Image: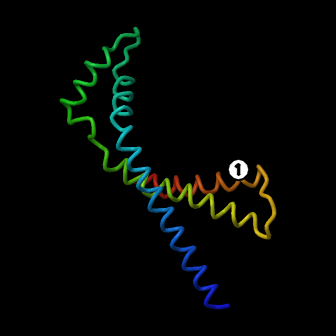
Amino acid sequence: MSNRAAGAGEGGRRETLAKVSLSSASAAAAEFSTFPIDALKIRLQLHRSPGGGGGGVLRVAGELVRDGGLYRGLSPAILRHIFYTPLRIVGYEHLRSYLASGGREVGLLEKAIAGGVSGVAAAGAGQPC
């Protein structure tokens, strides 16, 4: 029985490592693909004047490219998500499983608490990036 338990523990660690790796990779890919749009949105918000003007999207995009490119500042954003996303997702799954010990159904309040705790922990770990 100890061999089966050790195998199950190793399999569980492998599964968790796979989830962490895949969630980190998917978060990095998502950040890479949406970063230029977010940078443009922020630049447009900063260029907005009180009178409602501020220039068009193409002009602001051109300025963004001239000022260092659409991906300037991408590294810290990806680094943040490499820590934040797996902690939030895998942490939530582990907390939910812990609360469901004994095979009982986890209620909405318990799921919300697990999500909140994992979100706060992930934000604390990812924010310094």
Q: Nearer the viewer, residue 126 or 32?
A: 32
- Per the image, the residue denoted by label 1 is 112
The colour mode here is rainbow
Side of 57 relative to 50 (left or right):
left
Q: Residue furthest left?
A: 66
Q: Residue at x 32, y 19 (%)?
A: 57
**Figure quadrant of residue 105:** bottom right
Side of 73 relative to 23 (left or right):
left
Q: Position of residue 122 (x, y in %)?
A: 53, 56
Kind of residue indicated by mark 1: Ala
Quadrant location, the N terminus: bottom right
Compared with 75, 92 (above or below) is: below
Q: Residue at x 55, y 55 (%)?
A: 88
Q: Secondary structure at mark 1?
A: helix
Q: Residue furthest bottom?
A: 2
Q: Position of residue 63 (x, y in %)?
A: 22, 25
Side of 32 relative to 91 (left or right):
left
Q: Residue at x 31, y 15 (%)?
A: 56
Compared with 91, 39 (above or below) is: above
